[in-house]
Image: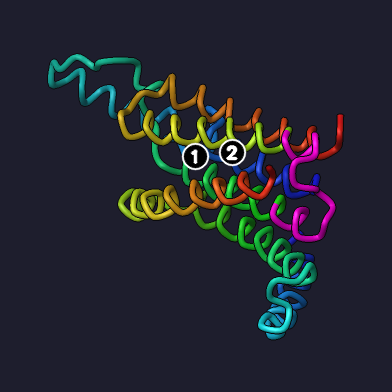
Amino acid sequence: LVDFSKIAASVLDTAEKFAPLLEGTPVGAVVLAGKSILDLIDNVKEVASSDDAAALSAKRDELEPLVLAHIDRTMDELG
Amino acid sequence: MRMMLALAAVALCLGGCANGPGLPSAETAATVGGVIDATGAKAPAPLASTSIDEKAVVLAFEAADTVATQVDTLVATGLLVKGSPKALAVKSALGRLRSFLTSASAAQKAGNATTYRQALSDAATAMHDAATALRGQ
């Protein structure tokens, strides 16, 4: 899984260089989707190993409004 | 898609399972319990059910963000059509996911372990419901 992640991250890093050209296109959306999965893997590792309660609390406070707003936007796109 | 949702479930479980890394060990709980006993203070509830931190809820938000991004992708690529029965079923699941995440966060802040765990469990169910809706089952 780690090796796969590294390979995929490398591919996505390359793809991101073309992000301005891909923005708003289906290909751009797929690149973003792939990157979000890799980000999730990294975040799970980071959060699971963290013992810094203050940092976790700050992260939650930062994430909560952003994620809720993202879900709202996504729901709007569904109908 | 299935891989992403499986990861989301893992993310939830990592912080939310009773013996997950987000919770202190039984030894730690016993030590803290001993200190409380020595002071004569009365614990408001069993320590095992009050020891909740932010790991589970942070991971749940991270996972939900990833789920939303994957759904965005399906819409952008035309695989999920706005207003279709499948899209509306996914929307319903996302709405429940949003509600349960909000509940879990509020319960964690209030230190209500029972509500917290229930809300996270419900959030995981909502993610699975979204996956089921996407498969058209």
At x 25% / y 15%, what residue is drawn? B44
Q: Position of residue A8 (x, y in %)?
A: 77, 70
Please give the residue where the numbered disc 1 appears in the rendered image. Answer: B56
Q: Amino acid at mark 1?
A: Ala
Q: Which chain is disc 1 placed on?
A: B
Q: Which chain is disc 2 placed on?
A: B
Please give the residue where the numbered disc 2 appears in the rendered image. Answer: B12
Few, some or many C-alpha atoms within 10 Å of disc 1 (few <14, some 14-19, many ≥20)? many
Q: Which residues are magenta?
A: B72-88
Q: Amino acid at mark 2?
A: Leu
- Which is nearer the eye, A30 or A46? A30
Inspect the magenta stretch and tell me whether residue A66 lies in it.
no
Marks 2 and 1, how far apart at CA: 6 Å
Quick one: quadrant of the C terminus of chain B? Answer: top right
Q: Position of residue B100 (x, y in %)?
A: 51, 30
Few, some or many C-alpha atoms within 10 Å of disc 2 (few <14, some 14-19, many ≥20)? many
First-in-chain label (2 vs 1): 2
Q: Is residue A25 above or below residue A62?
A: below
| Tag 2 and tag 1, C-beta contact below 8 Å | yes
Point out which mark residue B131 bears.
Answer: none
